[in-house]
Amino acid sequence: MTESYRQLTCADSGAFFRLMLTAFAPIREMGIRFDAASVSEAQAVQHLQDHGVFGLFVDDRLAASITLRYPWGPLPGPFGLPHIGWFAADPAFRGQHRGRQLLDWLETHILREVLKAPAVSLGTATRHPWLKEMYLSYGFTPQHESDLGKGHITLFMKKILDDAQHDRWLTRRSGHESKDTR
């Protein structure tokens, strides 16, 4: 069994689209309106063009994917940090922790080594039966809740990747906010 990680391109749009439909089927059945759960093929291509989407391939099959929305991109997260979205694992790999494996790789190789990010955020529906607990077990902490008009309340969470760097980032951020209000 061979495993590889890489950023997805538009050439991967078919596999990415199929993964979204398959992995998010239970979300659709719960009636939770995540954007990834009802994506069209054209939206999947646009998503790949607009964001950093990374995949774990097992024997050349897309086993899991995760999107990084950048603070400077078209759909930034709420904190001015890289923001995780459209996090999915193929149900055919159930029990193999492929999503967790991809998240660990992303944190180490992309967020810490490449982007030097102090932290990362994500959002999930408060009424989802197990995602909050899963993200807590991955080291994310709840920050605040918001109604984004999607029929559910979104819980935003953050994971600090480097304490010292995060402290410096908070100091710079509070300095910019005070200058912006003058």
Image (spheres, rainbow, N blue to C red):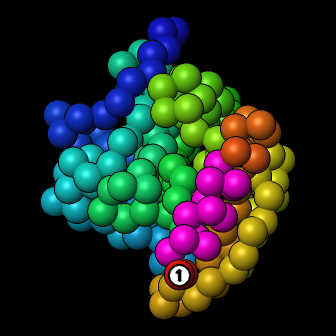
For this rendering, which residue is in front, 101 or 73? 73
Q: Principal SS element in the magenta part?
A: helix
Q: Where are the magenta residues, as a range? A: 169-180
- Placement of 177 over or under 110, stated as above or below: below
The residue that appears at 29% across and 39% down in the rendered structure is 15
User: Visible in this render: residue 99?
Assistant: no
Q: Is residue 150 left or right of residue 123?
A: left
Q: Which residue is mark 1?
A: 182
Q: Is residue 3 left or right of residue 163?
A: left
SS assignment at label 1: loop
Image coordinates of residue 159 in percent, x first then y, are: 72, 49
The residue that appears at 69% across and 55% down in the rendered structure is 170
The residue that appears at 51% across and 9% down in the rendered structure is 1
The answer to which quarter of the image holds residue 175 is bottom right
For this rendering, which residue is in front, 161 or 58? 161
User: Visible in this render: residue 145?
Assistant: yes
Amino acid on which disc 1 is placed? Arg
Magenta highlight on residue 170:
yes
- Placement of 180 over or under 172, stated as above or below: below
- Placement of 63 over or under 19, stated as above or below: above
